[in-house]
Amino acid sequence: MAEITRTPAPLIVPNPHDPRLTERVTGIDQSGAKTEIKVPVERPLTLYLNAQEIVTMMTINDYPEYLALGYLLNQNMLKYDDVVTEVEYDDDLQVVVVRTEHHTNFEAKLKKRTQTSGCAQGTAFGDLLDAFESVVLPKATLRTSWLYQMTHAINTMPSLYFEAGAIHGCALCSQGTPVCYTEDVGRHNAVDKIAGWIYRHGVDPADKILYTTGRLTSEMVIKTVRMGIPILVSRSGYTAWGVDLARQVGLTLVGRVRGKRFVALSGEDRIVYDQKLEYVEEESAKHRRKGESQDE
Protein backbone atom coordinates (compact mmCIF):
# COMPACT_ATOMS: atom_id res chain seq x y z
CA MET A 1 0.00 0.00 0.00
CA ALA A 2 1.45 3.39 -1.01
CA GLU A 3 2.36 6.15 1.40
CA ILE A 4 -0.15 8.97 1.72
CA THR A 5 0.90 11.79 -0.61
CA ARG A 6 1.50 15.09 1.14
CA THR A 7 -0.25 17.98 -0.54
CA PRO A 8 0.23 21.78 -0.34
CA ALA A 9 -1.18 23.07 2.94
CA PRO A 10 -4.64 24.61 2.51
CA LEU A 11 -5.87 27.40 4.77
CA ILE A 12 -8.54 25.84 6.96
CA VAL A 13 -11.07 27.60 9.17
CA PRO A 14 -14.27 26.32 10.80
CA ASN A 15 -17.58 26.57 8.97
CA PRO A 16 -19.90 27.89 11.71
CA HIS A 17 -22.93 27.39 9.46
CA ASP A 18 -22.32 23.67 8.85
CA PRO A 19 -25.63 22.08 10.04
CA ARG A 20 -23.76 18.96 11.22
CA LEU A 21 -21.88 20.89 13.87
CA THR A 22 -24.76 22.41 15.87
CA GLU A 23 -28.26 21.61 17.08
CA ARG A 24 -31.08 23.90 18.17
CA VAL A 25 -32.27 23.26 21.72
CA THR A 26 -35.34 24.81 23.38
CA GLY A 27 -35.39 25.93 27.01
CA ILE A 28 -36.40 28.90 29.13
CA ASP A 29 -34.49 32.07 29.97
CA GLN A 30 -34.07 34.06 33.19
CA SER A 31 -37.60 35.46 32.89
CA GLY A 32 -39.20 32.05 32.38
CA ALA A 33 -39.85 32.74 28.69
CA LYS A 34 -39.31 30.04 26.10
CA THR A 35 -36.05 30.44 24.18
CA GLU A 36 -34.11 28.51 21.55
CA ILE A 37 -30.31 28.42 21.26
CA LYS A 38 -27.67 26.66 19.20
CA VAL A 39 -25.33 24.21 20.94
CA PRO A 40 -22.33 22.32 19.50
CA VAL A 41 -22.87 18.70 18.53
CA GLU A 42 -20.57 16.37 20.49
CA ARG A 43 -20.01 12.90 19.04
CA PRO A 44 -17.75 9.97 19.93
CA LEU A 45 -14.94 9.16 17.51
CA THR A 46 -13.04 5.91 18.08
CA LEU A 47 -9.45 5.86 16.85
CA TYR A 48 -7.66 2.71 15.73
CA LEU A 49 -3.97 2.47 14.91
CA ASN A 50 -3.77 -0.49 12.54
CA ALA A 51 -5.78 -3.19 14.35
CA GLN A 52 -5.46 -1.73 17.85
CA GLU A 53 -8.14 0.43 19.45
CA ILE A 54 -6.43 3.48 20.98
CA VAL A 55 -9.02 5.90 22.34
CA THR A 56 -12.57 7.20 21.97
CA MET A 57 -12.65 11.00 21.80
CA MET A 58 -15.61 13.35 22.14
CA THR A 59 -15.42 15.78 19.25
CA ILE A 60 -17.42 17.92 16.84
CA ASN A 61 -15.78 15.69 14.20
CA ASP A 62 -15.17 18.19 11.42
CA TYR A 63 -11.60 17.06 10.59
CA PRO A 64 -11.33 13.41 11.74
CA GLU A 65 -8.21 12.69 9.64
CA TYR A 66 -6.24 15.59 11.14
CA LEU A 67 -7.49 14.78 14.64
CA ALA A 68 -6.46 11.11 14.39
CA LEU A 69 -2.99 11.83 13.02
CA GLY A 70 -2.41 14.68 15.46
CA TYR A 71 -3.46 12.65 18.50
CA LEU A 72 -1.08 9.82 17.59
CA LEU A 73 1.79 12.23 16.92
CA ASN A 74 1.27 14.17 20.14
CA GLN A 75 1.06 10.95 22.19
CA ASN A 76 4.32 9.67 20.63
CA MET A 77 2.54 6.71 19.03
CA LEU A 78 3.47 8.01 15.59
CA LYS A 79 6.74 9.63 14.52
CA TYR A 80 6.98 12.36 11.92
CA ASP A 81 9.13 10.07 9.74
CA ASP A 82 6.75 7.08 10.00
CA VAL A 83 5.05 6.00 6.79
CA VAL A 84 1.26 6.31 7.03
CA THR A 85 -0.32 4.29 4.24
CA GLU A 86 -3.98 5.12 4.85
CA VAL A 87 -6.38 7.09 7.03
CA GLU A 88 -9.88 5.67 6.72
CA TYR A 89 -12.94 7.33 8.25
CA ASP A 90 -16.37 5.69 8.57
CA ASP A 91 -19.03 8.29 9.36
CA ASP A 92 -21.71 5.69 10.12
CA LEU A 93 -19.56 3.79 12.64
CA GLN A 94 -17.83 6.95 13.94
CA VAL A 95 -14.47 5.22 13.54
CA VAL A 96 -11.18 6.42 12.07
CA VAL A 97 -8.37 3.97 11.30
CA VAL A 98 -4.76 5.03 10.75
CA ARG A 99 -2.67 2.38 9.00
CA THR A 100 1.12 2.43 8.93
CA GLU A 101 3.73 0.59 6.90
CA HIS A 102 5.12 -1.20 9.95
CA HIS A 103 3.34 -3.14 12.69
CA THR A 104 2.58 -1.23 15.92
CA ASN A 105 1.59 -2.38 19.40
CA PHE A 106 0.97 0.04 22.29
CA GLU A 107 -0.91 -2.25 24.66
CA ALA A 108 1.55 -1.72 27.53
CA LYS A 109 1.70 2.02 26.99
CA LEU A 110 -2.08 2.40 27.03
CA LYS A 111 -2.19 0.93 30.53
CA LYS A 112 0.08 3.69 31.84
CA ARG A 113 -1.81 6.75 30.72
CA THR A 114 -2.28 9.65 33.14
CA GLN A 115 -5.43 11.79 33.22
CA THR A 116 -4.44 15.42 32.71
CA SER A 117 -6.21 18.76 33.06
CA GLY A 118 -7.43 18.52 29.46
CA CYS A 119 -11.22 18.60 29.17
CA ALA A 120 -12.95 15.35 28.17
CA GLN A 121 -10.22 12.84 27.20
CA GLY A 122 -7.04 14.65 28.23
CA THR A 123 -4.21 12.14 28.66
CA ALA A 124 -0.44 12.02 28.74
CA PHE A 125 2.09 9.22 28.92
CA GLY A 126 5.27 9.02 30.98
CA ASP A 127 7.62 8.72 28.01
CA LEU A 128 6.51 12.17 26.78
CA LEU A 129 7.96 13.76 29.92
CA ASP A 130 11.07 11.59 29.83
CA ALA A 131 11.88 12.96 26.37
CA PHE A 132 11.79 16.57 27.57
CA GLU A 133 15.44 16.52 28.65
CA SER A 134 16.61 16.08 25.05
CA VAL A 135 14.28 18.65 23.45
CA VAL A 136 15.87 21.57 21.60
CA LEU A 137 13.35 24.11 20.34
CA PRO A 138 14.18 26.76 17.73
CA LYS A 139 15.06 30.16 19.23
CA ALA A 140 12.30 31.98 17.40
CA THR A 141 11.55 35.67 17.92
CA LEU A 142 8.07 36.91 18.80
CA ARG A 143 7.32 40.47 17.73
CA THR A 144 4.52 42.22 19.59
CA SER A 145 3.23 43.51 16.25
CA TRP A 146 2.70 39.88 15.18
CA LEU A 147 0.99 39.11 18.49
CA TYR A 148 -1.56 41.91 18.13
CA GLN A 149 -2.11 41.29 14.40
CA MET A 150 -2.62 37.58 15.06
CA THR A 151 -5.10 37.93 17.91
CA HIS A 152 -7.14 40.52 16.01
CA ALA A 153 -7.33 38.23 12.97
CA ILE A 154 -8.37 35.22 15.07
CA ASN A 155 -11.03 37.21 16.94
CA THR A 156 -12.66 38.30 13.69
CA MET A 157 -12.52 35.11 11.61
CA PRO A 158 -15.44 32.64 11.16
CA SER A 159 -16.02 30.74 14.39
CA LEU A 160 -18.40 28.15 15.75
CA TYR A 161 -17.85 29.76 19.17
CA PHE A 162 -19.80 32.84 18.11
CA GLU A 163 -22.62 30.64 16.78
CA ALA A 164 -23.01 28.23 19.68
CA GLY A 165 -20.39 28.81 22.40
CA ALA A 166 -18.89 25.94 24.45
CA ILE A 167 -16.00 25.66 21.98
CA HIS A 168 -12.20 25.99 22.16
CA GLY A 169 -10.13 27.31 19.28
CA CYS A 170 -6.49 26.82 18.22
CA ALA A 171 -4.63 28.56 15.43
CA LEU A 172 -1.26 27.99 13.81
CA CYS A 173 0.21 31.31 12.76
CA SER A 174 3.06 32.39 10.53
CA GLN A 175 4.27 35.64 12.06
CA GLY A 176 0.99 37.54 12.48
CA THR A 177 -1.09 35.55 9.99
CA PRO A 178 -3.23 32.50 10.89
CA VAL A 179 -2.65 29.66 8.40
CA CYS A 180 -4.74 26.98 10.12
CA TYR A 181 -7.60 27.46 12.60
CA THR A 182 -9.49 24.63 14.28
CA GLU A 183 -12.20 24.38 16.93
CA ASP A 184 -13.57 21.61 19.12
CA VAL A 185 -15.27 20.94 22.44
CA GLY A 186 -11.86 20.13 23.95
CA ARG A 187 -8.76 22.28 23.53
CA HIS A 188 -6.64 19.12 23.18
CA ASN A 189 -8.74 18.03 20.17
CA ALA A 190 -8.32 21.43 18.53
CA VAL A 191 -4.53 21.36 18.88
CA ASP A 192 -4.31 17.72 17.77
CA LYS A 193 -6.09 18.68 14.54
CA ILE A 194 -3.35 21.23 13.92
CA ALA A 195 -0.66 18.59 14.56
CA GLY A 196 -2.34 16.34 12.00
CA TRP A 197 -2.57 19.21 9.52
CA ILE A 198 1.16 19.94 9.94
CA TYR A 199 2.05 16.28 9.36
CA ARG A 200 -0.35 15.75 6.46
CA HIS A 201 0.97 18.73 4.51
CA GLY A 202 4.65 18.70 5.54
CA VAL A 203 4.52 22.16 7.15
CA ASP A 204 7.67 23.41 8.91
CA PRO A 205 6.72 24.30 12.52
CA ALA A 206 10.07 25.88 13.45
CA ASP A 207 8.99 29.48 12.77
CA LYS A 208 5.34 29.17 13.74
CA ILE A 209 3.21 30.37 16.68
CA LEU A 210 0.47 28.26 18.28
CA TYR A 211 -2.51 30.14 19.70
CA THR A 212 -5.16 28.61 21.96
CA THR A 213 -8.20 29.93 23.79
CA GLY A 214 -7.59 27.37 26.55
CA ARG A 215 -5.43 27.39 29.66
CA LEU A 216 -1.68 26.97 29.34
CA THR A 217 -1.50 23.65 31.15
CA SER A 218 1.17 20.95 31.18
CA GLU A 219 -0.78 19.13 28.47
CA MET A 220 -0.81 22.12 26.12
CA VAL A 221 2.92 22.69 26.65
CA ILE A 222 3.70 19.00 26.01
CA LYS A 223 1.70 18.97 22.78
CA THR A 224 3.32 22.20 21.54
CA VAL A 225 6.80 20.84 22.23
CA ARG A 226 5.95 17.52 20.53
CA MET A 227 4.95 19.52 17.45
CA GLY A 228 8.25 21.44 17.44
CA ILE A 229 6.56 24.84 17.72
CA PRO A 230 8.68 27.39 19.66
CA ILE A 231 5.95 29.85 20.75
CA LEU A 232 2.66 29.17 22.57
CA VAL A 233 0.13 31.97 23.11
CA SER A 234 -3.24 32.01 24.91
CA ARG A 235 -5.94 34.45 25.91
CA SER A 236 -6.29 32.38 29.11
CA GLY A 237 -4.18 31.81 32.21
CA TYR A 238 -1.48 29.38 33.31
CA THR A 239 -0.86 26.41 35.56
CA ALA A 240 2.39 26.20 37.53
CA TRP A 241 3.43 22.92 35.92
CA GLY A 242 2.78 24.32 32.48
CA VAL A 243 5.13 27.22 33.21
CA ASP A 244 7.79 24.90 34.70
CA LEU A 245 7.79 22.62 31.65
CA ALA A 246 7.94 25.58 29.24
CA ARG A 247 10.97 26.98 31.07
CA GLN A 248 12.71 23.59 31.01
CA VAL A 249 12.71 23.46 27.21
CA GLY A 250 12.85 27.18 26.37
CA LEU A 251 9.30 27.43 25.01
CA THR A 252 8.12 31.04 24.74
CA LEU A 253 4.89 31.13 26.76
CA VAL A 254 2.54 34.11 26.58
CA GLY A 255 -0.84 34.17 28.32
CA ARG A 256 -3.74 36.45 29.24
CA VAL A 257 -3.63 38.06 25.80
CA ARG A 258 -6.60 40.44 25.75
CA GLY A 259 -6.52 43.59 23.64
CA LYS A 260 -3.29 45.41 24.55
CA ARG A 261 -2.48 43.20 27.54
CA PHE A 262 -0.42 40.03 27.87
CA VAL A 263 1.90 38.32 30.37
CA ALA A 264 4.94 36.27 29.28
CA LEU A 265 6.29 33.74 31.80
CA SER A 266 8.84 31.91 29.67
CA GLY A 267 11.07 33.02 26.79
CA GLU A 268 10.66 36.69 27.64
CA ASP A 269 14.09 37.48 26.18
CA ARG A 270 12.90 36.51 22.70
CA ILE A 271 10.05 39.05 22.61
CA VAL A 272 10.67 42.18 20.51
CA TYR A 273 8.53 45.17 21.53
CA ASP A 274 8.07 46.76 18.12
CA GLN A 275 4.42 47.85 18.46
CA LYS A 276 3.44 51.06 20.22
CA LEU A 277 0.52 50.38 22.56
CA GLU A 278 -1.32 53.59 21.66
CA TYR A 279 -1.92 52.14 18.18
CA VAL A 280 -3.33 48.83 19.45
CA GLU A 281 -7.14 48.54 19.57
CA GLU A 282 -8.93 46.98 22.52
CA GLU A 283 -11.14 43.97 21.82
CA SER A 284 -14.67 44.82 20.77
CA ALA A 285 -17.46 43.20 22.77
CA LYS A 286 -18.80 41.68 19.54
CA HIS A 287 -15.66 39.60 18.99
CA ARG A 288 -14.65 38.92 22.58
CA ARG A 289 -14.07 35.28 23.48
CA LYS A 290 -14.46 34.07 27.03
CA GLY A 291 -11.21 32.17 27.54
CA GLU A 292 -10.31 30.41 30.76
CA SER A 293 -8.60 31.76 33.84
CA GLN A 294 -6.27 29.55 35.84
CA ASP A 295 -9.01 29.32 38.48
CA GLU A 296 -11.66 27.83 36.15
Image (cartoon, rainbow, N blue to C red):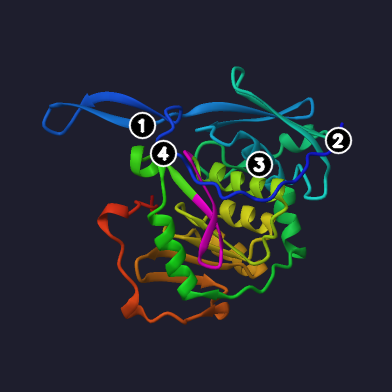
**Coordinates of residue 141 in the picture (x, y in percent):** 59, 75
Question: From mark 1 to mark 2, how far is it between C-alphas?
Answer: 40 Å
**Residue 293 shows in this picture:** no
Give neighbour class at mark 2: few <14, some 14-19, many 20+ (Cα, 10 Å).
Answer: few
What residue is rendered at 67% in x and 60% in y? 205
Question: From mark 3 to mark 2, how far is it between C-alphas?
Answer: 22 Å
Q: Amino acid at mark 3?
A: Tyr
Residue corresponding to mark 4: 16
Whichever of labels 3 and 2 marks the residue nearer the N terminus, that label is: 2
Whichever of labels 3 and 4 marks the residue nearer the N terminus, that label is: 4
Question: Magenta residues?
Answer: 170-185
What residue is rendered at 46% in x and 74% in y? 145
Residue corresponding to mark 3: 71
From this viewpoint, which residue is outermost toward the left? Answer: 31
Q: Nearer the viewer, mark 3 or mark 4?
A: 4
Q: Amino acid at mark 1?
A: Val
Give neighbour class at mark 1: few <14, some 14-19, many 20+ (Cα, 10 Å).
Answer: some
- Say whether residue 81 is left or right of residue 33: right
Disc 2 is placed on an element classified as loop
